[in-house]
Image (cartoon, rainbow, N blue to C red):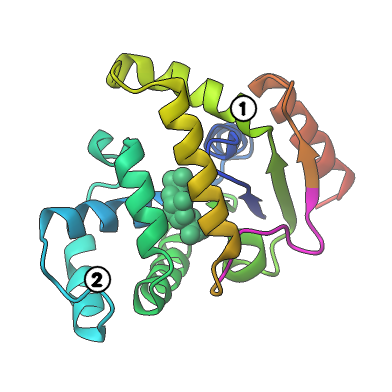
């Protein structure tokens, strides 16, 4: 079973993906963590021509041993850089290869995979069994993200986060290559007022109804 979850920044994709992975014994790929890791690598190694094949090859060998769970990649500034570099053609093409490789390698130990991102249902896994597209008001997403960041970065304000989310969404929606948009066969779920438990129940009900 392949499930894709797409949607804008901080819409709860990761939480739903983790919960579905646990419920159905699925391999979970948080595809945004790949761009985040690349963004941090680019910031830490400045002065490189990021839009070349040579750089993509270097990036590929560097990411082979990367820790995609590194808490340092979760900041707002890394998220912005991740969104910026995700528009570069050579980097996006490397990202697609890495996502497919990771899922192919991960799947044998599980009963399938759940992939969250921006183009998981449209580009990465167009034949997924179930595609979900999450919508949550930008004010509510900023509120949730603000509460989360209070423990790690108390200097960041709600307004900073709101602006960052809006800028990132706009860039992710309007880029030419693999923009954020629902697949034509995706279930579009407006989850502004739902708790993570309610979101999980809704997703399980939709998956059940598909009789996979
Ligand atoms: O899901 P996230 O917030 O960690 O993603 C960070 C950025 O990476 C996001 O703003 C755009 C980019 N991204 C993408 O272009 N395509 C994906 N499938 C996942 C993330």
Q: Pointer 1: what residue?
A: 139
- Residue 184 is a magenta residue: yes
Query: Mark 1 falls on what kind of element?
Result: helix
User: Horizontal placement of 96 versus 53: left or right?
Assistant: right
Q: Compare residues 101 and 50 and report the one nearer the observer.
A: 50
Label 1 crowd (10 A; few <14 / some 14-19 / many >=20): some
**Chief secondary structure of the magenta span?**
loop
User: Residue 199: percent from the left, percent from the top?
Assistant: 72, 28
* Nearest to N terminus: mark 2 or mark 1: 2
User: Horizontal placement of 67 versus 197: left or right?
Assistant: left
Q: Where is residue 20, by image quadrant?
A: top right
Q: Pointer 2: what residue?
A: 60
Of the residues tagged 2 and 1, which is closer to the observer?
A: 1
Query: Mark 2 falls on what kind of element?
Result: helix
Q: Where is residue 123, by image quadrant?
A: bottom right
At a point 42% along the width and 55% down the height, the residue shown is: 83
Q: Where is residue 208, by image quadrant?
A: top right
Q: Residue furthest bottom?
A: 53
At a point 44% along the width and 64% down the height, the residue shown is: 99
Is label 2's Cβ within 8 Å of ligand 1?
Answer: no
């Amino acid at each position: 079973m392949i499930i894709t979850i797409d949607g804008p920044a901080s819409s709860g994709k990761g939480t739903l993906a983790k919960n579905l992975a646990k419920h159905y014994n699925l391999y979970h790929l948080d595809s945004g963590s790949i761009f985040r890791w690349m963004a941090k690598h680019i910031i830490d190694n400045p002065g490189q021509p990021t839009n070349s094949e040579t750089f993509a090859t270097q990036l590929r060998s560097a990411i082979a041993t990367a820790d995609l769970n590194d808490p340092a990649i979760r900041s707002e500034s890394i998220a912005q850089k991740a969104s910026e570099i995700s528009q570069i053609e050579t980097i996006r093409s490397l990202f697609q290869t890495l996502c497919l490789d990771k899922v192919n390698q991960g799947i044998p130990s599980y009963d399938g995979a759940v992939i969250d991102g921006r183009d998981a249902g449209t580009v990465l896994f167009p034949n997924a069994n179930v595609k979900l597209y999450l919508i949550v008001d930008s004010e509510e997403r900023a509120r949730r993200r603000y509460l989360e960041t209070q423990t790690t970065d108390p200097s960041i304000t709600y307004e900073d986060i709101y602006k960052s989310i809006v800028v990132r969404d706009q860039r992710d929606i309007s880029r030419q290559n693999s923009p954020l948009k629902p697949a034509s066969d995706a279930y579009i779920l407006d989850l502004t007022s739902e708790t993570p438990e309610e979101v999980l129940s809704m997703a399980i009900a939709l998956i059940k109804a598909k009789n996979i």
